[in-house]
Image: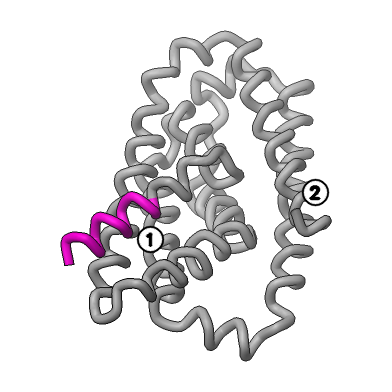
């Protein structure tokens, strides 16, 4: 069981380390110090649900719903294009210094809605959690629960560290130029992921 849990932890951590839409959003909220705990828990709990789904039944889902993959790709790409455009617009037209110091606070429910959309409308999340982790878990017959627990723990640790650790970078982002750079990078990352989804990369 220890081997299964350790493998789940290391694999899960390696999959979520890459900069993506979800991570960029958590980083941004951490810098703003707005609803950080709620956003981190929303991401981690979502991952836990998807990991459990992958470990228990990803093969059956793929067989029953062959249309799900292209539908998720197109829906996720559309959402990411819109979100990326918002970030780029903010980078060039907003009072970035005020946003960086938290003067413009988003409400809890709109923030959570955006967070959950970035998670559940992103096919890459399903690829990592449901397909890849689900596949690897089959190597540990009878110990799938330990594998899933390890991967879930990695998710909780990562998102909490990212969200609350971002505060240490806050002095850097008090400068308007730094905040504009971050918003630009986030927007371009969203668009890049969207293009990969559309063209199947």
Disc number for residue 6: none
Q: Whole-Å distance between the Cαs marked 2 and 1?
A: 27 Å
Asked if marks 2 and 1 touch (Cβ < 8 Å), the reply is no
Examine the image and state in which quarter residue 85 appears: top right
Picture residue at 16% right of the left edge, 61% below the top: 2
Identify the residue at the far left of this view: 2
Picture residue at 30% right of the left edge, 73% below the top: 140
Q: Which residue is mark 2?
A: 195
Neighbor class of circle 2 (other Cα within 10 Å; few <14, some 14-19, many 20+) is some
Identify the residue at the far right of this view: 199
Residue 130, position as x, y percentages in the image:
50, 69
**Measured along the vertical axis of the image, is residue 75 above or below residue 58?**
above
Residue 74, position as x, y percentages in the image:
78, 64
Question: Which region of the structure is painted magenta?
Answer: 1-12
**Measured along the vertical axis of the image, is residue 95 above or below residue 28?**
above
Q: Which residue is mark 1?
A: 45
Pick whichever, 33 or 43, lies toward us: 43
Left or right of 30 on screen, residue 81? right
Element type where label 1 sits in the image: helix
Picture residue at 23% right of the left edge, 68% below the top: 146
Q: Quadrant of the N terminus?
A: bottom left
Examine the image and state in which quarter residue 20 appears: top right
Q: Give yes or no for residue 11 being in the magenta stretch.
A: yes
Left or right of 96 on screen, residue 41? left
**Measured along the vertical axis of the image, is residue 95 above or below residue 155?**
above
Main SS class of the magenta portion in the image? helix
Residue 111, position as x, y percentages in the image:
53, 47
Pick whichever, 85 or 190, lies toward us: 190
Pick whichever, 47 or 176, lies toward us: 47
Question: Of label 2 and label 1, which has the lower sequence position?
Answer: 1
Q: Give yes or no for residue 93 being in the magenta stretch.
A: no
């Amino acid at each position: 069981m220890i081997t299964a849990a350790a493998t789940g932890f290391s694999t899960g951590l390696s999959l979520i380390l890459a900069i993506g839409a979800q991570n960029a959003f958590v980083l941004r909220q951490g810098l703003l110090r707005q609803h950080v705990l709620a956003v981190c828990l929303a991401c981690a709990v979502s991952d836990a649900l998807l990991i459990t789904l992958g470990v228990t039944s990803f093969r059956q889902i793929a067989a029953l719903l062959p249309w799900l993959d292209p539908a998720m790709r197109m829906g996720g790409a559309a959402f990411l294009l819109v979100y990326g455009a918002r970030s780029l617009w903010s980078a060039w037209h907003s009072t970035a210094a005020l946003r960086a110091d938290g003067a413009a606070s988003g409400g809890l429910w709109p923030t959570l809605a955006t967070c959950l959309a970035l998670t559940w409308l992103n096919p890459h999340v399903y690829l990592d959690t449901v397909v890849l982790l689900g596949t690897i878990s089959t190597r540990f017959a009878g110990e799938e629960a330990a594998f899933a627990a390890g991967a879930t723990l990695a998710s909780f640790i990562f998102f909490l560290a990212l969200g609350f650790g971002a505060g240490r970078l806050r002095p850097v982002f008090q400068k308007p130029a730094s905040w504009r750079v971050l918003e630009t990078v986030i927007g371009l990352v969203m668009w890049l992921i969207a293009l990969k989804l559309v063209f199947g990369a």
